[in-house]
């Protein structure tokens, strides 16, 4: 009998680490992907100490073109197949797009879009075979234009659009597809992005642990979109009644005042 795993990218910290803990606590054997092997080792030890199965660890940099091949080879060597895929890895950069480093912005696209798409397509047959699930971590930014973080917001819009489409396509084969769209979460994301959280973040903030649990429960229930937190759930609804140009102006104003 082939052993199945829940493959989680960006698992070394933040929402990804909490997703790993939630899945492991609910009896899933997890395979964890991240750049930092030391962080993965620490997380694996914590999962085992909490009574979970020893995770399969795949240190890998998703900015590299061969990342998908490396992950697939590691899974094949371990003799496991993916029944649930969690595309959590991603990062943002704060600032005007013309002023930010172009190479770093292209690396953002490599992680947030290319790697997510590669893994989603690469393991779709396995997800169908095991009637599993796909959880893509997008953001409430997916619903908004993003001056001040233009490429990041655009990348998350792509994730949401792709997830919606795959919810329809893979759903016909018994696969649950969910887009997790959190708002501000106190993690390393802000430091790497290069900004300090403001009042808007404080009001809308939800912990990484709560976001992870909401994402897990949403996937298990087959929800198309999960918006953790009451304030975050209100944003897409309110956007229906506000002109796009006004939203663009307000987001730009908030970003400039960070």
Image: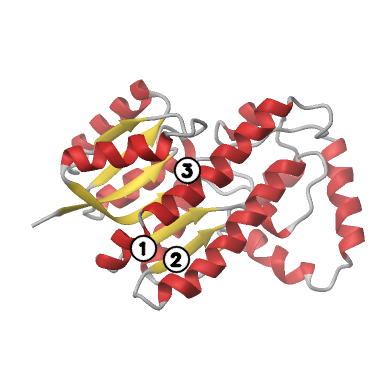
**Mark 1, secondary structure of its residue:** strand
Identify the mark at residue 177; answer none if there is no mark.
2
Q: How many neighbours does mark 1 have within 10 angstroms: few (below 14), some (14-19), or many (20 or more)?
A: many
> Which badge, 2 or 1, is on the more N-terminal residue?
1
**Mark 3, secondary structure of its residue:** helix
CA separation in Å, label 3 and label 1: 18 Å
Q: How many neighbours does mark 2 have within 10 angstroms: few (below 14), some (14-19), or many (20 or more)?
A: many
Residue at image point 83% right, 27% down: 99
Q: How many neighbours does mark 3 have within 10 angstroms: few (below 14), some (14-19), or many (20 or more)?
A: many
Residue at image point 33% right, 47% down: 7
Identify the mark at residue 12; answer none if there is no mark.
none
Q: Quadrant of residue 72?
A: top left
Q: Would residue 185 appear left or right of 34 to someone viewing this image?
A: right
Q: Would residue 2 appear left or right of 82 to someone viewing this image?
A: left
> Which badge, 3 or 2, is on the more N-terminal residue?
3
CA separation in Å, label 2 and label 1: 6 Å
Q: Nearer the viewer, residue 127 or 42?
A: 127
Identify the mark at residue 15; answer none if there is no mark.
3
Q: Quadrant of residue 161?
A: bottom right
Q: Which residue is mark 1?
A: 133
Residue 146 horizontal/vertical position (percent)? 78, 47
Residue at image point 39% right, 30% down: 60
Residue 101 horizontal/vertical position (percent)? 74, 24
């Amino acid at each position: 009998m082939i052993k199945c795993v829940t493959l989680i990218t960006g698992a070394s910290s933040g929402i990804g680490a909490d997703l790993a803990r939630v899945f492991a606590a609910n009896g899933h054997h997890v395979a964890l992907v991240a750049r930092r092997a030391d962080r993965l080792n620490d997380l694996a030890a914590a999962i085992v100490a909490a009574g979970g199965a020893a995770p399969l660890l795949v240190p890998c940099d998703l900015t590299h073109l061969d990342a998908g091949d490396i992950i697939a080879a590691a899974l094949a060597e371990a003799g496991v197949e993916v029944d649930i895929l969690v595309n959590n890895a991603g990062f943002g950069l704060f600032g005007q797009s013309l002023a930010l480093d172009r190479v770093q912005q292209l690396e953002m696209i490599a992680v947030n879009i290319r790697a997510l798409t590669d893994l989603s397509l690469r393991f779709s047959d396995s997800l169908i075979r095991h009637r599993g699930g796909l959880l893509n971590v997008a953001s409430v930014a997916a619903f908004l234009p993003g001056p001040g973080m233009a490429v990041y917001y655009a990348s998350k819009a792509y994730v949401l659009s792709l997830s919606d489409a795959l919810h329809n396509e893979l759903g016909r084969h018994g696969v649950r597809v969910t887009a997790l769209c959190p708002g501000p979460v106190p993690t390393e994301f802000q430091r790497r992005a290069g900004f300090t959280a403001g009042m808007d973040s404080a009001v809308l903030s939800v912990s990484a642990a709560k976001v992870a649990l909401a994402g897990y429960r949403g996937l298990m229930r087959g929800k198309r979109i999960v918006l953790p937190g009451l304030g975050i759930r209100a944003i897409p609804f309110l956007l229906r009644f506000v002109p796009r140009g006004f939203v663009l102006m307000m987001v730009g104003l908030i970003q400039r005042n960070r």
